[in-house]
Amino acid sequence: MQRPNAAQLAYGSATVVLATVALLLLSRTTTTLGITVISLAGLLLGLLVAVTMPVRPASVKILDAVPAPPGNEEVRVPTAPVGAGADTRTGS
């Protein structure tokens, strides 16, 4: 099994917290056994979310996923204008 990435850890942790709080509020249990069962259910649900979340392969690069525009191989980048009085200013 691969190590979980940051998104899997974040979604799994958020699921554990939100599911546990929601279940505790909805069940209104006050017993130790009920709280333990609900906590374990939230933990299992978070683990299920983290494990079943689709993972992007490491070999796919973001730039490879975006196709280049057809027929336009050269990319022009605008630059700042040079000259036109830029060197004739005084410090006053």
Image (cartoon, rainbow, N blue to C red):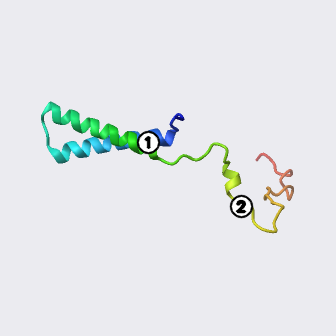
From the image, tell me which residue sits under label 2. 67
Measured as percent of width and height from the top left, residue 74 is found at 84, 61
Residue 73 position (above or below residue 11): below
71 or 92, nearer to the observer? 71
Q: Amino acid at mark 2?
A: Pro
Mark 1 residue crowding within 10 angstroms, few (<14) / some (14–19) / many (20+): many
Image coordinates of residue 73 in percent, x first then y, are: 83, 62
Point out residue 52 in the picture as x, y percentages from the top left corner.
45, 46
Query: Badge 2, how many Cα within 10 Å: few under 14, some, many 20+?
Result: few
Q: Which mark is residue 50?
A: 1
Q: CA distance from mark 1 to mark 2?
A: 31 Å
- Give the quadrant of residue 78: bottom right
Task: Residue type at mark 1: give it.
Answer: Ala
Position of 36 with respect to 70 (left or right) is: left
Helix, strand or loop at mark 2:
loop
Near-viewer residue (10 or 47) = 47
- Residue at x 52%, y 38% (from the top left corner): 5
- The answer to whether residue 62 is left or right of residue 49 is right
At x 49%, y 43%, the residue is 7
Q: Could one spot residue 11 in this view of the protein?
A: no
- 87 displayed left or right of 1: right
Residue 59 in which image quadrant: top right
In this orientation, does residue 89 appear?
A: yes
Seen at 33% across and 39% down, the residue is 44
Residue occupying image coordinates x 51% and y 48%? 54
Q: Which residue in the rendered view is the most extreme toward the bottom?
A: 71
